[in-house]
Amino acid sequence: MAWGCRALWTAPLAAVAMTCAPALAQTPASKAPKSLAMPATTGTPVTPQASPGQKPAEATPAERAAYDKAFQATLEKPSDPETLARFADLAVKVGDIEGAISALERLLLIDANQPEVKLELGVLYYRLGSKEAALTYLEGARSSPEASPQVRDRAEEFLKAARR
């Protein structure tokens, strides 16, 4: 798959990154699809704040409705990368970490060479307390030749936290 095409559907993962690994939100807005908003860029790197088993705040009714709609969209388009990325973002927001993991793993089935997705999976598994799965994905993100310096740095931060 050509990079230009992949940028259209991997950029929405930055929304998931805002919840899990904020430094990834520095993805240029020019790579975001016009249909999905990019989160605000954070100026300073944030250390891993998510702890294993940490529960998110209760979802609002609007977030829950958007999540339900996105879930239905994944049933209609189970291999559409943009649909999967949107669902993963909303799943994290409503606290469905397993749902987000499922969507992100499907993205890896479409294209396995996505260090951003591996980083997100590592962070989500870390939040669930699944240390071995977290370490596997974080190592994959850090060692990927296509990983940006920000992805490598975030993966390293979470690797240190997961090894404690």
Image (spheres, helix red, strand yellow):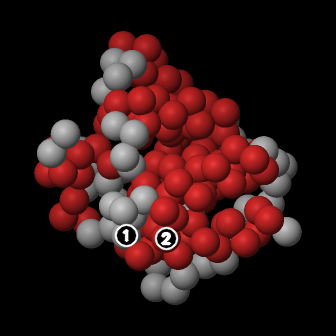
Q: Estimate the x, y position of residue 105 in percent, counting from the top left.
A: 51, 34
Q: Residue furthest top?
A: 76
Query: Can you tell which quarter of the image residue 26 is in?
Result: bottom left
Q: At x 43% / y 14%, what residue is drawn?
A: 75
Q: At x 33% / y 49%, what residue is drawn?
A: 10
Q: At x 33% / y 61%, what residue is drawn?
A: 146
Up/down of 154 relative to 5, above or below: below
Query: Can you tell which quarter of the image residue 94 is in?
Result: top right
Label 2 sits on what residue type?
A: Arg
> Around disc 1, counting alpha carbons within 10 Å, would you say few (fewer than 14), some (14 to 19), or many (20 or more)?
some
| Residue that numbered label 2 is attached to | 152
Foreground residue among 111 and 66:
111
Which part of the image, by quadrant, shows the N terminus? top left
Q: Secondary structure at mark 1?
A: loop
Q: Estimate the x, y position of residue 19 in percent, counting from the top left.
A: 58, 58
| Residue that numbered label 1 is attached to | 148
> Around disc 2, counting alpha carbons within 10 Å, would you say few (fewer than 14), some (14 to 19), or many (20 or more)?
many
Using residue 47 as the reference point, say whether residue 37 is left or right of it: left
Which part of the image, by quadrant, shows the C terminus? bottom right
Using residue 105 as the reference point, say whether residue 34 is left or right of it: left
Pointer 1 and pointer 2: residues touching (CB < 8 Å)? yes
Q: Estimate the x, y position of residue 127 in percent, counting from the top left.
A: 74, 51
The CA distance from mark 1 to mark 2 is 6 Å
Label 1 sits on what residue type?
A: Ser
Q: At x 61% / y 78%, what residue is drawn?
A: 46
Foreground residue among 157 and 71:
157
Q: Secondary structure at mark 2?
A: helix
